[in-house]
Image (cartoon, grey):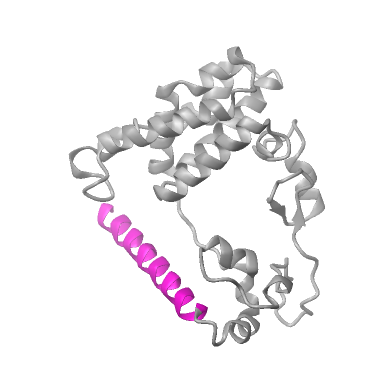
Amino acid sequence: LASQLAHMGLPAAPAGAEELLCQARPSDDTAPSSAPSLIPCPGEGCAEVFCGEACRDWALMPEATSSHALLCFGRLPAASRVALERLERLAEESETEHLLLLAHSVAVMVLARQRGQPLEEVLQRYAGQFVSEPWDALAAEGRGASAEDTPESRRGLLARATALIHELFAFVEPALAAPLLAPELLSGLLGSYELVNMCISLLHPLNAEGKLVGELLKGTGILPLLADFQGQAEQDSDSESEEEGGEE
């Protein structure tokens, strides 16, 4: 709970918040709440967690298709770590999480190329088979999410993200990485995300401990702030649903 509150930028968590953990709970709500905690990545400085040891071990295998095998914080050179952190901040500040997904897509393609898969096959598998348009073109003629979301603003944002992605993958052999960092490919991938991806909402694991969370935060002034966050999330979800319905 403490780390979740810090991530949301809320006031300091009260005593006891560190002990209230996210847990992989059984589907049977009547089962004891002593299910094993999520499994942390062993990489130094890596904050990722997994649902189990098998999931963690798979994600760290170079022969797997998980971007974590390349982007685990503990495996990245120092300069790439900084670039990844800056990209994460840019994605959060611009409310464009697909910028971070872009880096993970490139990582998966890099791993495939390192395993010896032909470039043409990799590009078709991870980009060419999906419908796509240049990302900036999807905001033309007022089709952006807001008045500020224009082709020009998207090109500027993508340029910033592209520079960070180049820094992130600077440790990869240039001849192998260069075709996967082409501006047209990156813009097309973002276009595919916008046209193909579906946004979903999942209940936070801490919801299962709602009563305990309420008791712990009572009188701290944090509960009203959490309610505001939830209200904003519901409004965003309703807006997306209305837009999708209008497009039909």
Task: Say if the magenta span includes residue 174.
Answer: no
Task: Identify the residue at image location x=50%, y=31%.
Answer: 164
**Which x, y percent locates residue 47?**
68, 51
Name the image quarter holding the N terminus. bottom right
**Which x, y percent locates residue 238?**
35, 66
Task: Identify the residue at image location x=72%, y=53%.
Answer: 50
Task: Identify the residue at image location x=38%, y=68%.
Answer: 232
Quadrant for residue 158, please give it: top left
Task: Identify the residue at image location x=59%, y=37%.
Answer: 82
Quadrant for residue 109, please give it: top right
Question: 137 or 156, which lies in front?
Answer: 156
- What span is colored magenta in the figure? 222-248
Question: 100 or 82, which lies in front?
Answer: 82
Question: 140 or 215, which lies in front?
Answer: 215
Q: Residue furthest front?
A: 12
Majority SS type along the magenta span:
helix
Task: Say if the magenta span includes residue 228.
Answer: yes
Q: Is residue 97 visible?
A: no
Note whether 212 is above or below 17 in the view shown: below
| Residue 73 in the figure: left or right of residue 192 | right
**Which x, y percent locates residue 74?**
73, 39
Q: Is residue 20 visible?
A: yes
**Which x, y percent locates residue 26?**
74, 71
Q: Residue furthest top?
A: 175
| Residue 178 in the figure: left or right of residue 189 | right
